[in-house]
Image (cartoon, grey):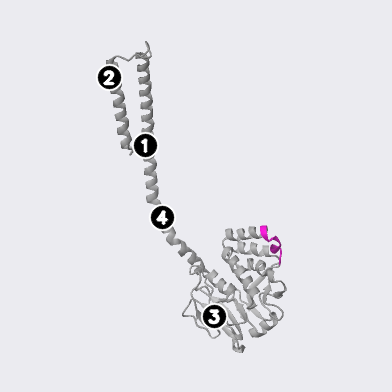
Amino acid sequence: MRAVYTALFGDYENLTEQPASSASTIRWICFTNNPNLTSDSWEIRVVEPQFPLDVVRSARMIKILGHPDLDEFDETLWIDNRITLKIAPETLLDEWLVDSELAMFEHSYRERLVDEFYAITKAGYDDPARVYEQLIHYAEVWPATLDAKPIWTALVARRQTTDVARAMRTWADHVLRYSRRDQLSVNQCVEPLGTAFNRICGDNWESEWHTWAHPGTDKSLGRNTAGARDAFVHAIRAPLSRLAEIEGPTADKLEALEASNAQREALIGKLRRDLARAKQQATKVATASGSGAASAKPPAKKRSRIVRWRAGAKRRLYRAARRLGYRR
């Protein structure tokens, strides 16, 4: 059994109708989170996105790993929403999977995978920090991959085999760990398939099998790029607002604590100096009164004054310590 499938989450663009479906006998399934979506070409399957706040990766996971509703099919063809098939998908699957288990186009206008990394960063399609991290890791671990001809992933024909499933799981892991742009990671992940992977040569924009709509010129897509930017703004607006609410009172408390700490340090310094002077004076008195003999005691009058002075100094010290919050 065979099926064609795609995924469309959010309000990013309109679902592309497929005239070739009228001449096809296999199933055409569109996975979406929009219960109001209708189509003359596709069977609409409403599903929950795997990541509700990341609809791009949610669609990527269905693209790469499939869906339980597809387990009954032996062969499947994924097509991006911008793809319009020119022929029946049965013909494409027959030609692409004749001697292989997985087939995708080669990139027709990039020579090296490293060029794709540069293009993604320049166009701002993903977080540059994440893209650069992936590039650095690949350069360290799989440098030869960066010089390979990149793969174009808008069409993915596959057989349901153990080796293909293992390659797809690795691919999904890279998309989750690194950039969501799956063309950056697919080369490394399908390489273990060897001859079971079929690289299709042809123009990515248009071939005997398909056409690929350009989002800037094909208005039928109805692509809402502003919506994607607004989603980011809305996602960070609440945390930033909460941060502003916390920041003011926290700064005031910090300033008050710093002032209190400065006063405490100043008082502690004064007490230490007073104690040092008291010790010096006590030492002088003891030295003066005991200069005649080591065992001699100072006169009772002087001794009483010293005792009172020491007791008074201790009381002052204890009172200051209590004001600072210290206890015996």
SS at badge 3: helix
Region in magenta: 140-148
> Around disc 2, counting alpha carbons within 10 Å, would you say few (fewer than 14), some (14 to 19), or many (20 or more)?
few
Residue type of the residue flagged with mark 1: Arg
| Of marks 2 and 3, the one in the foreground | 2
Residue topped by disc 4: 244
**Spatial separation of the CA atoms under disc 4 and disc 2:** 63 Å
Reading the chain from its start, which is encountered first: label 3 or label 1?
3
Report if residue 31 is visible in the image. Answer: yes
Q: Which mark is residue 304?
A: 2
Q: Which residue is pictured at 38% across the width and 39% down the height?
A: 261
**Spatial separation of the CA atoms under disc 1 and disc 4:** 30 Å
List x then y, in percent, for residue 87.
Answer: 65, 84
- Residue 115: image quadrant is bottom right
47 relative to 166 in the view: left or right? left
> Around disc 1, counting alpha carbons within 10 Å, would you say few (fewer than 14), some (14 to 19), or many (20 or more)?
some
